[in-house]
Image (tube, grey):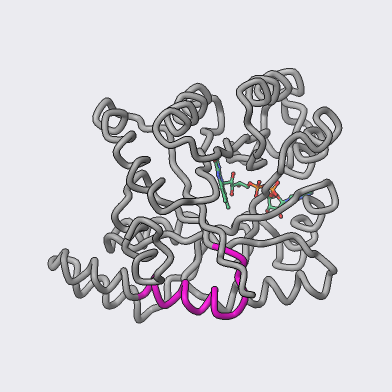
Amino acid sequence: MTVPPKISFELFPPRTPEGVAKLPSVIGKLAAAQPEYFSITYGAGGSDQNGTYETLATVVRHSGVKVAPHLTCVGSTRAHIAAQLNRYREAGVKRIVALRGDLPATAMSPAAPGDFHYANELVSFIRETHGDAFKIDVAAYPEMHPQAPSPGADFDNFCRKVEAGADGALTQLFYNADAYFDFMERCAKAGVKIPVVPGIMPITGCANTVRFCSGCGADLPRWVRLRLEELENDKPALVDFGLEVVTRLCETLLGQGAPGLHFYTVNQADPTLGVLKNLKLSAAE
Ligand SMILES: Cc1cc2nc3c(=O)[nH]c(=O)nc-3n(C[C@H](O)[C@H](O)[C@H](O)COP(=O)(O)OP(=O)(O)OC[C@H]3O[C@@H](n4cnc5c(N)ncnc54)[C@H](O)[C@@H]3O)c2cc1C
């Protein structure tokens, strides 16, 4: 019997009163697709740590779907991280997305303030202090993390997170399925058995897609960029094209064994639900 792919959705803590007001309806629409969980981002450097908690509470209140707060560690102390973990545990959270986070390059030097420099240290800390109380997901970069010296070094660092106790991984966004398949081949050769779920960013515009890709080092195929540029002033046609590209990407990934899909929803329900509908994966239909 085929196992249905696991679907999950990422939200971020809204930064405006309008965003806060809209969030319950976004959550309601997305929850109707019966995701396994919602993950909620966490701003590095303390910008929206309470926001993560509040968004988590909103998801629970409006959907009852499981939640996975993101937790970043760079520049933080063991005491601070311990307090966050205790707060989550008391709130009944059972899953954490464990990350390094982004701070200026100086923050990554071994002499930098803070008790953590890389995500594998956070994974080890969670395991040391909470055993198996949390399921831990980590980030994976099929096209290499932009600060890594080489794909091989980055992959070794990914394996460090797995060895530290990660249960699963979510990838950075990508539009080139071959990069994911290559990453999975490397996992198979290295004996990495945890599920690596592709991170999917629906396409809703030209400028934002180009920006997202250049921000994280993802390859936006030239033909996709050219078509998006051509359709920039015809929003309905651009949305249709983006939907088709992302649907095809997801079909290819699932058709060749991806265990699920993790959608970067950017707090919008319709683009993600459009893809799920095309894939016939929306319980909301
Ligand atoms: C699914 C997903 C969710 C995300 N959510 C958030 C979020 O909520 N908030 C946020 O601020 N950011 C988020 N990010 C971005 C993430 O924080 C950045 O990409 C960050 O730069 C790296 O985080 P990481 O956990 O992958 O770091 P790491 O795994 O620590 O890797 C970071 C870099 O250091 C290198 N490295 C790792 N370990 C070592 C080591 N021991 N020695 C030397 N080099 C090493 C790696 O090769 C890589 O180049 C997310 C990214 C993804 C893919």
Q: Residue at x 48, y 70 (%)?
A: 219
> Considering only vertical position in the picture, is 78 above or below 70?
above
- Name the spot of residue 259 as percent of width and height, x first: 62, 66
Q: Which residue is farthest left?
A: 234
Q: Residue at x 78, y 50 (%)?
A: 161
| Residue in the foreground of this view, choosing between 43 and 93 | 93
Q: Which residue is farthest front?
A: 1
Left or right: residue 45 compared with residue 123? left
- Name the spot of residue 202 as percent of width and height, x first: 37, 61
| Residue in the foreground of this view, choosing between 103 and 159 | 159
> Considering only vertical position in the picture, is 285 above or below 8?
below
Helix, strand or loop: magenta stretch = helix
Left or right: residue 279 compared with residue 156? left
Residue 181 belongs to the span the image colors magenta: no
Specify the quadrant that holds the N terminus. bottom right
Specify the quadrant that holds the C terminus. bottom left
- Name the spot of residue 240 as percent of width and height, x first: 24, 71
Residue 255 belongs to the span the image colors magenta: yes
Left or right: residue 107 compared with residue 39? right
- Name the spot of residue 115 as percent of width and height, x first: 77, 28
Left or right: residue 141 compared with residue 17? right
Q: Residue at x 58, y 40 (%)?
A: 102
Which stretch is magenta? Answer: 245-260
Q: Residue at x 50, y 43 (%)?
A: 38
